[in-house]
Structure formats: structure tokens, C-alpha cells
Image (cartoon, grey):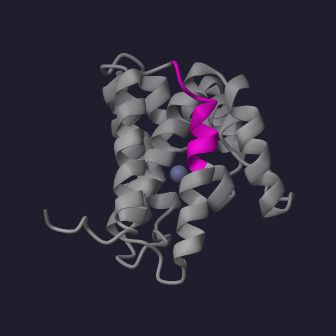
């Protein structure tokens, strides 16, 4: 199958699987916006050279958020895609703090593909904190999230200067959104 058809099929599958899911932010964007943003970031970071990576990015939250069976991803999109998706899927049987701690520890050991998706995922999430934070997220919770995302990303660096720059800009924007503007000079 032509690669771009496979990428579109994955976008179609992601839209169906996440159809009722919304982002946590006050704007409640459809979840597919997040998936397309992450996929576009990794596609640009690799100059469109890796369709398997882009498909995995579109499906990166399918198992974790929608409990899509792994066998279904293997059948529809192949094992290489499913392996990357599993690599970026948290074990939801663990308590949240432990999952967050594990992401920091595991980041440097991930494959290049998983690192790119995680970097794009954190970039997208920090952009949302700046543009449309969740209504029930206190300032402290937002600060905690920014610090944690930076700690995870510290273990992902060295694979894509461009994507790392997108992350750094998103982190600065998220931090700026929590402070009053500098006094006029
Ligand atoms: Zn995500």
C-alpha cells in the first residue's frame, strides 16, 4: 500500500477510536487535534522520511486512553507500528506518581522513534498548558507538570535539535503564561 494512504488510514482510525475524547484544557479541543499535532511534529522533525513513525504518532494514545487491543494495531498497521505504540504506553495499573517517575528513568533507554514521539507529545501538552490550561489545574499543578516534562525531556535529547527547540519554546511559553508580563521599561 502506498505509504501516504496508510498514514491517512491511521488518522481515520485515530479519529474513530478517540471520537468522544476531548483534551483536558478549557477549550476542550477534540483529542484528534493533539494526535495530529504530535504526528505533524515528528513528520517535520524527520522531513517526512518515516511513515511508520508518523502512523505510530497518530496511534500513540490508542492503547493507553482507549484500550485498543494491540492485536488490532498489529493487524491493521503492522508490528513495527504496534511496537512503537507499546513503547510509549504507560502501565496504567501503576499509581500515577510511579508512572511519572518511570517516564523520567526510562526516557534515555527508549528507541529513537519512541523518543521523537515522547518529545512531540510533551511539546503538544505544554503548548496546551500555555494556550488552554485545564480549568481544575492549579498554578502549582501546572508548574509541577512543566518541571516533570522538562525532566523527562532531559533524557530524550540528542535526536532532533529542531524538535528539542519546539519543546523549549513550548516550555518557555507555558512558564510565561503563569507570570504577569514584565513591568514596562
Ligand atoms: Zn499524547
Q: Residue at x 50, y 37 (%)?
A: 119
**Residue 124 % position (x, y):** 42, 51
Q: Is residue 80 left or right of residue 10?
A: right
**Residue 111 % position (x, y):** 64, 21
**Residue 2 % position (x, y):** 34, 21
Q: Residue at x 42, y 19 (%)?
A: 50
Residue 51's place in the image compared with 123, above or below, is above
Q: Is residue 117 left or right of residue 173?
A: right
Magenta span dominant secondary structure:
helix
Q: Residue at x 58, y 20 (%)?
A: 112
Residue 151's place in the image compared with 77, above or below, is below
Please provide the residue range marked out in magenta: 149-158
Residue 10's place in the image compared with 145, above or below, is above
Residue 153's place in the image compared with 99, above or below, is above
Farthest front residue in view: 185
The reply to whether residue 8 is visible in this rendering is: no
Q: Nearer the viewer, residue 84 or 165?
A: 165
Amino acid at each position: 500500500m502506498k505509504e501516504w494512504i496508510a498514514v491517512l488510514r491511521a488518522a481515520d482510525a485515530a479519529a474513530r477510536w478517540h471520537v468522544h475524547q476531548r483534551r483536558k484544557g478549557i477549550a476542550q479541543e477534540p483529542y484528534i487535534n493533539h494526535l495530529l499535532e504530535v504526528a505533524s511534529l515528528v513528520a517535520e522533525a524527520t522531513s517526512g522520511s518515516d511513515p511508520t513513525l508518523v502512523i505510530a504518532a497518530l496511534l500513540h494514545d490508542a492503547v493507553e486512553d482507549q484500550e485498543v487491543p494491540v492485536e488490532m494495531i498489529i493487524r491493521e498497521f503492522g508490528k513495527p507500528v504496534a511496537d512503537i505504540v507499546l513503547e510509549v504506553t504507560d502501565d496504567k495499573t501503576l499509581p500515577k506518581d510511579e508512572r511519572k517517575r518511570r517516564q523520567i528513568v526510562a526516557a534515555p533507554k527508549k528507541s529513537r522513534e519512541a523518543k521523537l514521539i515522547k518529545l512531540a507529545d510533551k511539546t503538544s501538552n505544554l503548548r496546551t498548558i500555555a494556550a488552554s490550561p485545564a480549568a481544575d489545574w492549579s498554578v502549582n499543578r501546572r508548574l509541577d507538570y512543566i518541571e516533570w516534562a522538562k525532566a523527562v525531556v532531559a533524557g530524550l535529547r540528542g535526536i532532533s535539535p529542531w524538535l528539542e527547540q519546539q519543546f523549549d519554546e513550548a516550555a518557555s511559553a507555558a512558564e510565561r503564561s503563569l507570570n504577569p508580563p514584565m513591568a514596562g521599561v
